[in-house]
Image: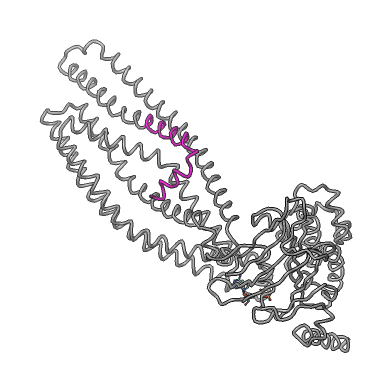
Amino acid sequence: MSPLLRILRFTRSLAPYYAGITIAAVVVTGAGLAVPFITGRATDVVVSAVGAVARGESVAEGTVRTVVLLAVALLAASLVETLMGNIGGYWGDVMSAKMRTILSSRYFEKLLALPQRYYDHELTGTIVARLNRSITEITNFMKTFSNMFVTMFMTTVAVLAISAWYYWPLAVLLAIAYPVYLWLTALTSRKWQRLENEKNEHVDVASGRFAEVVGQMRVVKSFVRERSELRHFEQHFDETVTLTGAQSRHWHTMDALRRGVLNVIFFALYVIIFLRTVTGHFSVGDMVMLIQLMALARQPVTSLSWVVDTAQRATAGSKSYFEVMELDPDEVEGGGGRPVELVRSGDGAAPDVVGHQDGAAPEVVRFTDVRFGYDDDPDVLSGVTLSVRRGERIAFVGESGGGKSTLVNLLMGLYATRSGTIEVAGAGDSPEALRRSIGAVFQDPSLFSGTIAENIAYGRPDATREEIEAVAERAAVASFVERLPNGYDTLIGERGIKLSGGQKQRIAVARAMLKDAPYLVLDEATSALDTKSERLVQAGLEDLMSDRTSFIIAHRLSTIAEVDRIVTLRDGRIDEIGTPAELAQSGGIYAELLALQHSASKADRKRL
Ligand code: ADP
């Protein structure tokens, strides 16, 4: 189906507006078409009166009344045209605002539903630029479409019918003019569209980079890359200037050709009208009316190219809009994979478990032969099997890039496995339900602009101020908030830029505490912090971990000395599993890393 028809279907709820705008356009065009009639008739009345006066005869009875009536009709037609034109304009404005809202919200809804993998491939700025362009072009077109279409259609039909009634060759000439013009316009469009797409790509790439640069300004400044980033940005826009030049040259060359052909045809039309008038076939009034009608007839033809231009942009816009709207989350995911399974046992009242209960705490999470890799890359995890008991603290250790974060990403249901299963005991059966039961603290605290209170309550927006303050106390947020003049209502800037790393991380811990989920993921939660902040955050994390099944990734091994079990990863597989004490003795990766960190900290102490 044509992308524009799909937009119409997609915005069915706006049908009353489309109808209203169409009716307004019918009235406006009708009133516009009445004007040549009225002036034509008035001219005839005036010409015959002037003739009578010249011949010394008396003016026909009722002439003045007719002229006045015609003038009043003229006034009425223009009043109706103005009134309906403005009412239609108002409906058009409201319609496009509503359309923008529908298209943007559905797009955002779609993006929110797409798997993490989509975001591994797309730049934020590109997504935003593409959305803005598509929606602007679609709404621009839709707003004027009903109006233009009705005017063009009605005027064309009326002018053709009236010309045929007066003298058929006029209609024949017009009937040739329209398709020729349309054909010449269509000839332009393919090349124009190709250049338009190329231009859009440059804008998308530049916008993607733009958003990245703005978001990481500190790095840009510290590497003094402002100029080169600007140059890179300008290069893309310079390309769009070159492409626009080519596009416009092509367009205007064809336009000159189109208009040239049209002028010749209209020249012939005028010659015919004048000849028919001097030979007495048309009255002067007929001539005045026909000339005005021809001027009206030219409008739809010439605005046709404008309509085609806007329609092309809108078509391209809706294509890229639907490209995203129709993404199948499973296909984006790569297909074939298995999402995390949520396992509910019993009637819901009994505790959910995935494995046997043998007196000790029940098994609540089980990885069975999990294989996973990103995109078409080789496996990052090639067969991981692991059971975790309720309340256990499990730490993952291995070299950087060994797949530790990947493992917890899979646990959170952010990616589907290539094969193997991950079972998590809990309520519900959707990825959302799964993620609701997992609290997470990452190395990058990822706060949002807004207040401290809003950020703490991000996982539970209905939390009371007392609840927020209680977790803030436990996570050592209260100690620095008390010193801020606006306390919990302090605005923290984009991504929390106004706070220190340690402060941000303490808010992230409080946020996870307030979420109060049975599972916890800590992915390098204290790695970016100085020792003092680390100690504060670590205390909060200890509190957070109590009674929760926790998965911890930390490169500073001192922070995981107290866990129940350590799992080491090597070549995408589990190498060893054991208590910290057991693994310290076993001579494996953990023991190696332990020795390394030990000698490093000894060297540190010596230097001090
Ligand atoms: P670790 O946490 O052990 O340092 P990761 O799980 O982050 O390791 O990474 C494992 C491997 O997966 C690395 O080789 C990394 O390059 C790759 N990787 C991580 N995230 C992505 C991603 N989003 N897309 C593609 N490859 C990724």
Instruction: Name which residue lies at 64% across and 55% down.
Output: 430
- Residue 246 or 425: which is nearer the viewer? 425
Q: Quick check: 355 above or below 66?
A: below
> Which of the colour schemes (rainbow, by chain, secondary structure, one colour) is used?
one colour
Image quarter of residue 170: top left
- Residue 210 or 409: which is nearer the viewer? 409
Q: Quick check: 167 above or below 120?
A: above
Placement of the C terminus among the 4 image quadrants: bottom right
Q: Quick check: 95 above or below 426?
A: above
- Residue 451 or 542: which is nearer the viewer? 542
Query: Magenta segment, principal secondary structure?
Result: helix
Residue 167 highlighted magenta (yes or no):
no
Image quarter of residue 296: top left
Quarter of the rendered structure image containing ligand 1: bottom right
Report x, y in % for residue 341: 65, 60
Report x, y in % for residue 185: 29, 52
Farthest front residue in view: 358
Residue 2 highlighted magenta (yes or no):
yes
Report x, y in % for residue 124: 58, 62
- Residue 584 or 46: which is nearer the viewer? 584
Which segment did they paint magenta?
A: 1-28
Instruction: Name which residue lies at 21% across and 43% down.
Output: 266
